[in-house]
Image (cartoon, coloured by chain):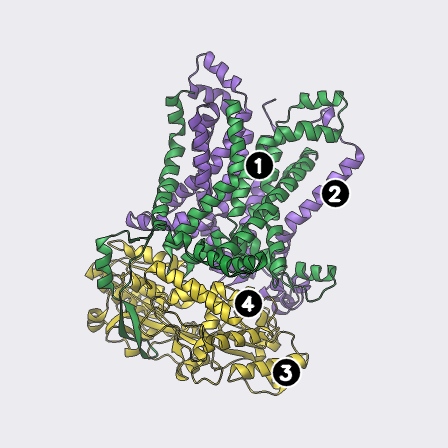
Chain colours: A green, B yellow, C purple
Amino acid sequence: MKHRTFFWFILPTALAMLLFIALPIVSVVTQSLFTPHEQVFKTVESCTPFKCTEATVIDTEATEALREESPLGRFAGLSIYLDRGHLATAEVAEAWRSSDGLKDFFNKLGNLPFYRAMSFTLTYTFVVTPLLIILGFAIAVAVNSLHRHLKGLVIFFSLLPMIVSPLIGSLVLFWMIDSRGVLGTALQWLFADPNLSLKASTGLTWVMLIVYGVWHSAPFAFVVFYAGLQTLPQDTLESSMIDGATRWQQTRYVVIPHLMPLVTFVALIQLMDNFRVFEPIVGFNASAHATSLSWFIFNDLGGETRLLSSASASSVLTILGVAILLSPVLIRTWRDFNEKG
Amino acid sequence: MFLKKAALASVLALTAGGAFAECEISARVNIVGNEFPAIQTIGAGAKECTGAEVEANLTADHQKINLAGMTGNPAEYTSAIVANSSIVALMNDDVIRPLDDLVAEYGQGLKKNQLITIDGKVMAVAFMANAQHLVYRADVLEQVGVEPPKTYEDMLAAAKMIREQGIMEHPIGGAFAGGWNLAQEFTNMYIGMGGEFFKPGTAEVSINNDAGIASLEMMKALSEYMNPDFLTHDSNATNAEFRAGNVALMNMWGSRAATMTEAEGVSDEVKAGFAIAGPMTVGGGEVPATTLWWDGWTVAKNISDEEAASTFIALTHAIRPEILNEETSLQAVWLIDGYEPTAAATGVFEAATANAVPYPMLPFQGLLHTALGAELTDFMQGKEDAASALADVEAAYVAAAKEKGFLQ
Amino acid sequence: MSSKAMKQPVALRTFSTIFVVLWLIVAAFPFLWTLWGSFKVELDFFSKADWRNALTGARTMVEHGSAFTSTGYEGAWVQEEFWRAVLNTAIVCFFTVTISLTIGTLGGYALSRSSYRYTFWLLITALIFRAMPPITLVAGYLLPFFEWNLWGILPTTIIVLVAINQPFTLWMLHSFFQKIPKELDESAKVDGCTQFQAFRHVIIPVMWPGVITTGLFSFLLAYNDFAVTSMLLSKENQTMVPKIASFLGTTQTEGNVMFAVAAVVSATAPLFILVMFFQRQIVSGLTQGAVKG
């Protein structure tokens, strides 16, 4: 395709992304390198309906003067990235020096928010992604062999976990798995442990979040694979039949290779989404047991005093994390691309 | 023509409960605030004003948009309805104006204690109050033969008896969900223990002390009598437990007391046994382990004086004593002249008379609150001891405060 | 579909049917449970006292004299005017899907037909764009939108949703277009068509399975979005999901959970009707597979 034609075809979508994603990313990166000015305090008397007390407030005039001098704030370099809320380099170094043995070191690491969040996020990502691809594939193959009058209905019900908004879907499940909810009771009965509570232990909370993640995202993989199965080359399948291939061999050597580009696609999208896991943590009120970088951002922006620089730094770290996570898939895509070229 | 006017006037008089007051404004008014019923009443009251457009965007996400919506010049919102914790963000960024001139000119009807004064300047006008206090099941306490607890120690003793007599397995409820709620409970307890959050006049945090540890130990002791899922229970979930009859004692928001047994399906037993009392003290302290809250309105800085005057007039109109009637009296503990406390309001009133302290209006209190909410969960799960949990809180706070420029 | 290669032995057929049934139960059970519970009072729905209450509606019986009540629906639809949110959602979804697909098919097609290096880098950039957490993006929009008086209205939200959704749409359509053999449009071009004419007359007729699938996801994104809609829409323009969230109440104020539950069910019902109504189109759209590899 000519450069010129290409340009006109890509222009609308590129413009939209440039304005609403690229520009904000630039501002976020800038934001993460600057912090607000030092605040000048003064002590004053403050009166509420209840009583008057001495209180510290910000001297807005003095602070305003500082702000006008350099509107972006103080240049902080990478210090936000390295502080305790993020990579915590100083604390990690200290933990390394003072700990006896690796176990102690990892314990100390687990006490730092970033590393604790990473341990959950990575576990979640690497358990959920393969499981949902396998489940989605199995559903797609099974649904594909159904009678065509049933397909519409089955597709609709299969989509339900995706249709019900994550915020609400996780809330509904949250109520159901309560130790006195229907699923909670069922599990207590199943494991013969009347005190079993999924929400009270970290391990079980993780399992619950992972099950939710697979449940929620499997329909996505299912629909993509299902659409892919429709373009399956029938003649290749038939000739493999004539050659005496078993059903398993057909699946292994015809169906899976045919779907491979879609598997790559689903893996890319899901690795990214799972790395940014957020809604279930909020929906399940699970922040005591599991956190993620996206949850950090939510926490920084949700407090009474917003930490914009910290949230920006977490966002940039998310992008970097995703880039690292996806690099194997991207390299593969690069190779495919060159072959195609 | 006259007849028509008279008819209109009488209709208006009727709809306003016979207390329709004139409210003429000359410039636009746009209010952003939370959406609970009392604030809806204020919004509707401001909209009665004629002469210019009055808009209100009342939403639960108000805190996320009010600062951005008041930063521009001219500001989108001419007023934000805030509480003592959330006014801080607006003052830190200097987007609200002092109201002294406006109070002198248009605010004769306001009571002195409604005016939130900081550094001698009126920054907000409060219209309602709130506090956490004891909510209990009178029937259950009677059954075990104890008085409603005055202290947290009594609460533990009562809970022990309730459990031992097999009445309830988890008699204590509490909004201990990780995050904002847990931090709020610590704040209450720490104040009750007589602790100071910061070294006076500075932003240097100092909670890793005996009061802090005692507070955490008390919270841990309480959690032993709670549903094991307590770290996921926010005030909604805690209320649901109480309504289901699983909980006999809890520290709950006054603003939710009026509707506690209103929900459909609450059993008669719970309805009859439901009772409220003032907040409890802890560790032999004098000050109740709770915080007082107010909700009030502010006026934006980056708007014309005419808009500011209109906003002030409209909102003063919205909180005039005549708005109080049977329905609105139940919506909140009003700070308006002529408000007769309803039964549900006694808890908040007792908190105020027992000299409870207001939630601190410090510029950096919000940062400490966020740090508490995130770092105390390890202790509550028994993964680390109280001192190291508090050390973690301090470290998290210091990182945040440095970023914000509160600490060097 | 009826080719010999697809015929299955009985054992496999049974196995796969059982599997589908099991999956359907797992997928639909929480929803059916919610549907059933939406006609109960709050205490039965939570069933904190005894889980069986949610089935039998013991407290609903006491309160309303029957095991079913529609108070949740009345509250949500009449008292809280949930229909406004439904209308807003319909508008947002319709325009988001249409605009996304229009500019996305153009872009995705171009990306699949150009073999220059920059197409790869464009795709990678789009992917990295997608990695940006939406909450941060939205927090950045607030100030300029307020400044330019764009905040709170539906068109702003639609454009933002389209933009945020573009990377995904591009990737998905790009991979579908790659499955359409290049020879199709190349031969049209040999016959004297311009690139756009080739796209218009040759590609558009065969691209529907991919476009429908992508459209489905764009739709779900717009339909389910919370981060963008809750921050960028004023109260009267709110869509369903933030509206439902607002029924849940906050720390200090009572919500009405049953309104939320009824609203969740109501929010899903139109989709059910939509899918039932268009099921032939959707299934044949997905099934057509106009292209034989």
Q: Which mark is residue B161?
A: 3
- The residue carrying mark 1 is C278
Residue assigned mark 4: B384
Q: Nearer the viewer, residue A2 or B11?
A: A2
The disc labelled 2 sits on which kind of residue? Ile
- Whichever of labels 2 and 1 marks the residue nearer the N terminus, that label is 2
Q: Amino acid at mark 1?
A: Phe
Q: Amino acid at mark 3?
A: Met
From the top left corner, tell me how far across and down residue A21 is, in percent: 39, 41
The verdict on a common chain for dots 1 and 4 is no
Q: Who comes first in sequence, dot 4 or dot 3?
A: 3
Q: Please check whether the numbered discs 2 and 4 fall on a single chain.
A: no
Residue position marked by numbered label 2 in the rendering: C18
- The answer to whether residue A230 is visible is no
Q: Quadrant of the N terminus of chain C?
A: top right
Label 1 in the same subunit as label 3: no
Subunit that carries the residue with mark 4? B
Quadrant position of residue B11: bottom left
Q: Quick check: B174 left or right of A183? A: left
| Chain for disc number 3 | B
Query: Which one is in front in this view, the residue at disc 2 or the one at disc 4?
Result: 4
For the residues tagged 2 and 1, is the chain the same?
yes
